Image (cartoon, rainbow, N blue to C red):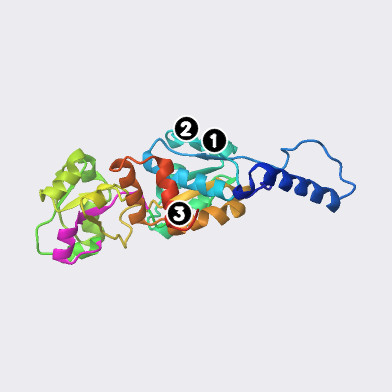
Amino acid sequence: MPITRIPRRLLGGAAALALASAVLAGCASSDPLATDTGDAGADTETIVIGSQAYYSNEIIAEIYAQALENAGYTVERSFNIGQRDAYMPEIESGAITVFPEYTGNLLQYFEPDTQARTADDVYAALVEALPEGITVLEQSTATDQDSYTVTAAFAEENGVTTIADLAGLSVPLTLGGPPELAERPYGPTGLADVYGVDVAFEATGDTTVESLVAGEVNIANVFTADPRIQTEDLVVLDDPEGLFLASNVVPVVGADLADELAEVLDPISAALTPEGLVALNVQSTEDQMSPADIASAWLEENGLL
């Protein structure tokens, strides 16, 4: 069922009344034999936008919400729901219309043994794996996933921009991360097998970023949306061989509304960059801005509001 949209700039007092009258008159003149059922809400639908209980995800959800409201949709926010086991049934049932997700993590939810790793392969596999009735719109280049990260000073001094560049270095390399990284397929063994990079490993746990900045390790396992990438001047190394599972930001939507909602949400995905997502998170953690203020400022800055 199509969603009736009335541009927000027209929703006020006499203008709204005049527009409503014009719509009713137009309906009557186009089909003089039509019967008025008296159900004024029959052709309208509220867009319900959900989010995880995670500040970064809520910011993205708020960006979606404000953009859709600006386009004339009626939006209901259902934020801070929790984990996928809690909200995926709501998406599948249609109770939630739009949800910001992460391609790799969502793909693993449906296909735990997936072998897809690069952004394009993960996206293609996700489209096929999703249940009937829901789909994804265009993915963003912004990610929230594991990475190997170095300080900007280390990157400049050694001329590294990708994980592959580490293989040519003569300096001893020490990788820091959570203890379980030692056994993960993308840990030290994966680095050696995929990129030919040999490293010592140090379990730095919750102090991984601090250990990297202090020079106690020179490579660290850091999530790509971590605000400290900006505040501590860190560099995420590109992963051309797909050692890590790509997990790009992507809107999950009801399939019957995909074409319509894409008009509003695809431009957001096109504008949201990895650095941009980190900056949004900095505004939350460092500047203590509300998700609503962060979202409206970003939309205005990108000409989307």
Q: Which image quadrant is residue 194 in?
A: bottom left
**Left or right, 158 with reference to 107:** left
Circle 2 is placed at which residue position?
86
Circle 1 is placed at which residue position?
90
Label 1 crowd (10 A; few <14 / some 14-19 / many >=20)? some
Q: Is residue 150 above or below residue 293?
A: below
**Residue 131: where, in percent of width, then height?**
55, 44
Q: Which image quadrant is residue 152 in?
A: bottom left
Do the residues under discs 1 and 2 have CB atoms within 8 angstroms? yes
Q: Secondary structure at mark 2?
A: helix
Query: Looking at this rendering, what residue extends furthest in the right direction?
Result: 33
Specify which label sits upstream in the sequence, 1 or 3.
Answer: 1
**Residue 192: where, in percent of width, then height?**
21, 57
Q: Secondary structure at mark 1?
A: helix
Callout in the foreground (1, 3): 3
Q: Amino acid at mark 1?
A: Glu
Specify which label sits upstream in the sequence, 2 or 3.
Answer: 2
Residue 300 marker:
3
